[in-house]
Image (cartoon, rainbow, N blue to C red):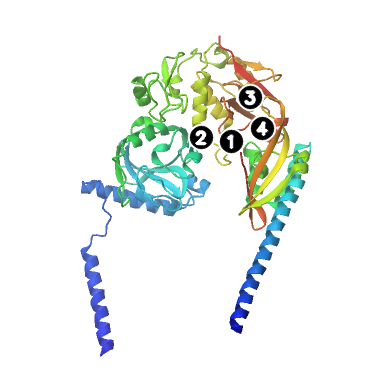
Amino acid sequence: MKRLLILMVLVIGTALIIKVFAYVNDNSDSEKILSFYHKYAVAYNIKDYRQSNAQCDSILSVYCTSKMCKDTKEDRVNGVSYDFATDNMGIDEAALKTLRVVQNGDHYVVTYRLNDINDRFQKIVRNVKLQVTMSNGKIATVQSVK
Amino acid sequence: MTKRIKIKCLFALCTLSLLIASCTDTSPFFDNFSNKTENDKVISCLDKTIGYVQKNEENILFMKARGYKASDLKYGLCRRLNYQGKMMLQIPVIKGNLTSAKVGDALTGQPTRAYALFVFDQRGRVSVVDYVEQLPSADYRDRHDGDLFYYDFQGVQDEYNEQGEYLGYYDVRKAATRIGKETTDSFPDDSSVIDGGDLPGAEIVAPYPTDPNDPFDGYNTELDSLASGDQCPVCGTDLEFDANDGTVYCPSCGYGCNNSYGGGGGGSGSSSSAGQSFSASKAIAYIKSIAYPYYMKDKCGHCARAVRQALERGGIDTTGHPLYAKDYGPYLMAWGFEEVSKENYIPKEGDVRVFQNLPGTTAGHIDIYGGDTWYSDYRENDYPGPKYKNVEVVIYRKTQK
C-alpha cells in the first residue's frame, strides 16, 4: 500500500513538473512574440527604406527561423517585398497599443488594430489577426486570418 | 533428433518458397495493355525513367528548385501518352504517400498538382524532361481542404523546359475536361500504368501567343458549338456572349478567353493600337484563372507578364511592351488607357495600377482590378504589400472609343 502511494505521488509529481515547464515555456513564447512585434513595428516604420530593412533583418534573425529571415531577404530582391512576419499586413507603432498575443492550442493568435489605407486611398482602421506558430523557440510561420 | 527434424523442415520450407518464386511471374504487368510488345515498351521506358530520375535527382531543375525527391514521382500512377509520335510518360508529382489512386478520389500527401513529363526517342531513351504545374482555382483550397482531385484543375500554365526557355502554355482546363469525361478510364485498383491514348496538340505546348494558323487550336472547335447561356464545360457557369468579337466565354473561370487574340484594332505596334477595343471582363476572367490564390514566393514575381497576358486576352495588342512593371504607364496610354485621379477614386473592373520600384529594386509592380480585389500573378488584397503604400502609383483606365 505504501509502495503504491509513493508511486502515485511520483507520477503526479512528474506530471505537475511537466505541466509547469510547459506553462513556463508557453509563457516565454508568448512574451517572445510580443517582444518581437514591439521591436519589429518600430523597425518596420523607419522612413529610410534601407535602414528599416537592416533593422528588421536583425530583429528577424533573433526571433524568427532562418527560413523566414531568408524568405524575407530574398523576396525584397526577387518578389514584391512580401512581409512574411505579418503575412503582408504590415504593422505600425500605433498598433502596439492594441497588440495582444493569446495562445490557442499549438499556435498563437496575434491581434492588433492597424491604421491603414485602402485601395480607394481612404484612411481605415484594419483589425489584423495573425496565426503564429513557433518552432524551437522561434517564430516559424505567420498567417493572417480573415 | 528434434534438431535434425527442425533443420529438415527449414530446408523444405526454403526449397518450397524458391519453387513458388520461380513459378511466379514477378515482372510487372499492366493489364491495360493487351499487346505484350507495348506493355514491355512501357515497362522498359518506366524503368529507364526511374533510373534517370534516381541518377539525376540533384540535376533535374524542377526537382532541385522545388525540393522534390525521386520518391515524390508516383510512377505507379503514370499515364502513357503519345506526343508528336513519340512515347511520353506523364508522372504525377506528389509529396508524401498516396492512399487512393482512382480518378475523382482524393489523394493524400501534399497536393502539388504537378506532372513530370518524360518523352522518349525512337531508341527508348529519355529525350525530353518537362514539368507542368497546374493551377488551382481561387477557392480550391477552401473547397477541398488540401485534397487533390484530378478533374478539378483549371487555368493556363506557362511552360518552360529544363533550360528555363519558354515553350508555350499548357491549357489545364482542356486536359481537365478530357479527364473528367474519361471517368470510366479510371486507374486500376492496383495503381498501374494506363494508356491515355493520343495527346491532342492543344493540350500541351501550344504556341504562344496563339497562332491563328495553328492547326492544333482545337480549343476553338469546342467553343464553336457553344452559345451564350450554355453551361461552361469546365465549371458549369453560364457562358456569356462577347459582342466585341462574337465569341462566348466563361465569366467565372475564363474558359474561351484565349479566343480574343486577333481581335481589336489589328495594329502592329503600340503606338497604333489606341483605338482597339478592350474587354475588361475577358482580361479579368483570364487573370483570375492564372493568379495564385495567395502570394507564393517561389512562383510569383511575374506581375508584368501576368497583367500583360490579361490585357492581351482582353484584346490589347501589347507588341513592344516594356520589360519592367514600373515602365508600363506610357505604354498603357499608347494603348488607349487614361490616367485616373486618386481623388474620390472608386476601382473599376479593368483598372490597371502601375507602382514605381521600391528603393534597391528595379521592377516596380503592376496589377489589375478584378471587381473584388486586385490581381497580378496572385490574388492581392488592397495592395501588393505594405511598403507599396508609400511608393508612387498611377492608375489607368481604358476609355472605350
Foreground tag (1 vs 3): 3
Looking at the image, is mark 1 or mark 2 earlier in the sequence? 2
From mark 1 to mark 2, how far is it between C-alphas?
18 Å
Looking at the image, is mark 3 or mark 2 earlier in the sequence? 2
Q: Give the quadrant of residue B220.
A: top left
**SS state under label 1:** loop
Residue pictured at 23% horizontal, 74% vertical: B15
The residue singled out by tag 2 in the image is B138
B22 left or right, relative to B236 = left
Dots 3 and 2: beta carbons under 8 Å? no
From mark 4 to mark 2, how far is it between C-alphas?
29 Å
The residue singled out by tag 1 in the image is B301
The residue singled out by tag 3 in the image is B353
Looking at the image, is mark 4 or mark 2 earlier in the sequence? 2
Q: Amino acid at mark 3?
A: Arg
The residue singled out by tag 4 in the image is B362
